[in-house]
Image (tube, helix red, strand yellow):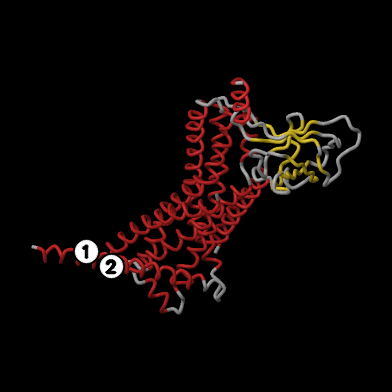
Amino acid sequence: MQSYRKIEIVVGLFVLLGIIGMGWMAAKLGQVGGLADEGYPVTATFSDVGGVRDGSDVMVAGVVVGRVSNVRLKGNEHALVTMTIQPGVQLTTDVIASVRTKGIIGERYIRLTQGADTEILESGDEIEETESALNIEDLVSKYIFNSSE
Amino acid sequence: MMSVSFDAVIRLLGSLGRFALTSLDRMGDATTLSLSSLALLFRRPWQGQHIVLQLYALGVGSFIIIAITGAFTGMVLALQGYYTLAKFGSESLLGAGVALSIIRELGPVLGALMLIGRAGSSITAEIGIMRVTEQVDALEMMAINPRARVLLPRIIATTIALPILVTMFDIIGLASGYVIGVELLGVNGGAYIGEMISKVMLQDLYAGWVKAVGFGFIIGVICTYMGYRAEPTTEGVAAATTKAVVAASVGVLIMNYVLTSFFL
């Protein structure tokens, strides 16, 4: 019976280590209760989001300040993007949201450029100034079209 | 001449049909056997002590082999990933690549294959020899249900142990990948960790764990079934052990494809 007791303790340790490991991975890598959940929502309407998805980064001055929590179609022609911004970050009411690309083939993210206003965006407000995704194919076709004229 | 070849075709069809029917029969037998064992979980007497003993033998006992496999998988992924990514000049993505392939795919699959080799074969051999030496019959004589005492604790133990072992595999793999990628190959440590955290989502972790639970369950079911239904001879147990390892490995790989297609 003594040895069974020892086995029980080792198994308990094994299971405990497993649960701690799962919790650690979920918190560290999966960001449970981290960046994704905390913060206040703001929305922005773009005419083309070109590849921004749920979970895409939102950056101010190159620093990640939140994530895109939802992208859907609004009024059959525009894209409505909902972002969750970290609590401590204050955005001016005239902040500009633009869809940018990390590197040449990198993923899309939303860059916020602060304006000069003194008023601060509240939870649930809409960002009015937006810049849509830069479409390289459009640029190339425009260039070709213009040069042939 | 014509009738001979016609006979051969008929015989071929017959054996194919017999093969299909026996496989179906065995699958049904395995399903009813394992489900009827699982149904005994909440029936008295409570088999907690045997579940703990099996967790020790199958789970804790497999830790070393899982740790070694995890460490070397992480290391080789970092090396191979670096070699490929360096061609595109995007070594900074190494952390994300290593983490996603270990968490989503290699952790559960390699962990399951290692558990089959280390624990599954021993389950089948043990139960098979219990049959040969008539211990199963002895249990029945003592009014102890062998399904509750022998099969149930092993199925529960592999189902609980594999997710835990896969988690340890993941953590050890990620750590050793970091050591090779950052310390040996000189990838930027901040980029390695940062890309890893930003690319790995909670659903990737879920996918890995759900796979691990599923694999643990089918390993337990197949290995106990093969042992329980083994022909009670020396050759019978040897054949059952071989069949159990083959069937469990193939089952894990097929189930892996199905689960991956669900989770992508």
Q: In whole angstroms, how far apart are the C-alphas of marks 1 and 2? A: 9 Å
Across and down, in percent, residue B87 comes to: 50, 25
| Residue drawn at x 82%, y 37% as measured from the top left | A89
Chain ID of residue with mark 2: B
Residue type at the position of mark 2: Gly
In the picture, measured across the screen, residue B7 lies left or right of residue B228, that is: left
| Residue drawn at x 30%, y 60% as measured from the top left | B239
Depth check: B65 or A75 in front?
A75
Across and down, in percent, residue A124 comes to: 82, 47
Across and down, in percent, residue B210 comes to: 55, 55
* Figure quadrant of residue A57: top right
* Figure quadrant of residue A31: top right
Q: Which residue is mark 1?
A: B12
In the picture, measured across the screen, residue A118 lies left or right of residue A32, that is: right
| Residue drawn at x 82%, y 34% as measured from the top left | A95
Q: Which residue is mark 2?
A: B17
Across and down, in percent, residue B175 comes to: 57, 37
Classed neighbour count for the residue bearing mark 1: other residues with Cα under 10 Å, few (<14), some (14–19), many (≥20):
few
Depth check: B132 or B114 in front?
B114
Residue type at the position of mark 1: Leu
Which structural element holds mark 2? helix
| Dot placed on the residue nearer the N-terminal end, 1 or 2 | 1
Q: Give the farthest residue toward the front.
A: A149
Task: Give the vertical position of A116 relative to B156 (above or below).
Answer: above
In the picture, measured across the screen, residue B96 lies left or right of residue B69, that is: right
